[in-house]
Image (cartoon, helix red, strand yellow):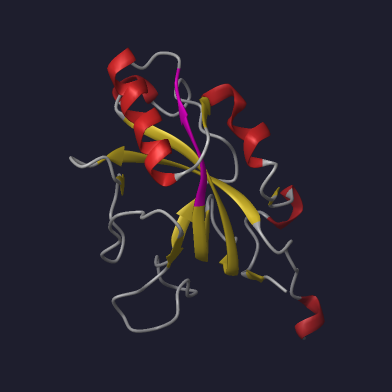
Amino acid sequence: MIDDVPLLPAEVVGYRAWRMGDDGELLPYVSVHGGGVWAPGIVTARCEHAHDAPAVGCSCGLHAAYEPPDPCRDGGFGRNHAVYGAIVCWGEIDTSSTDFRAQYARVVSLAFWRMQTWHQTELIRATARAYEVPCVELAQLAAVAGEYGEEIPQALRGLAPAFGP
């Protein structure tokens, strides 16, 4: 029954780690279904199987973590070149996994980790200026992201797909 489908706030916050392209663009660490550059502005999920993304039973959609990254926990010592950030997501959202997948998203903040080199930190700051988003220390990322949307409630994580209003 449609009343049993949980509703999320209009925009929810997610977290990502990207790698930086040669021209300062944000690229996913793993490209799912041809996912490429995360351009400034709105990014729309696409699937090579010609269905709307995200779809149940498929890995398509714009992936995001529920919680801010922790490089020490997540193996960050090998990711000195990672660009961490927060995104807001809306549209159809699949919360049935350890991360979630969304139909639409946009980058709202980038962050650097205190253990990254000065050079990498400056590259991240330049990318943030190009994307016209704030750049903060990783420990501040959740607070800044909270200005743009709400995190998906714990009770809805790992459940069947949820849809926005």
Q: Is residue 156 left or right of residue 73?
A: right
Q: Is residue 22 left or right of residue 121?
A: left
Q: Which residue does the image show at 36% across and 55% down from the upper left? A: 39
Determine the residue located farthest toward the left in the rendered image. Answer: 22
Quadrant of the frame with the N terminus: bottom right
Dominant secondary structure of the residues highlighted in magenta in the image: strand
Q: Which residue does the image show at 74% across and 75% down from the upper left? A: 5
Q: Is residue 102 left or right of residue 37?
A: right
- Residue 81: x and y in percent read 29, 27
Q: Quadrant of residue 139?
A: top right
- Residue 26: x and y in percent read 32, 45
- Residue 30: x and y in percent read 29, 49
Is 19 or 134 nearer to us in this picture? Answer: 134
Quadrant of the frame with the C terminus: bottom right
- Residue 103: x and y in percent read 50, 69
Question: Quick check: 48 above or below 72?
Answer: below
Question: Quick check: 4 above or below 80?
Answer: below
Q: Which residue does the image show at 31% across and 60% down from the upper left? A: 32
Q: Quadrant of residue 21?
A: top left
Q: Which residues are magenta?
A: 107-113
Q: Which residue does the image show at 47% across and 75% down from the upper left? A: 55
Q: Is 41 inside the magenta-drawn segment? A: no
Question: Quick check: 8 above or below 130?
Answer: below
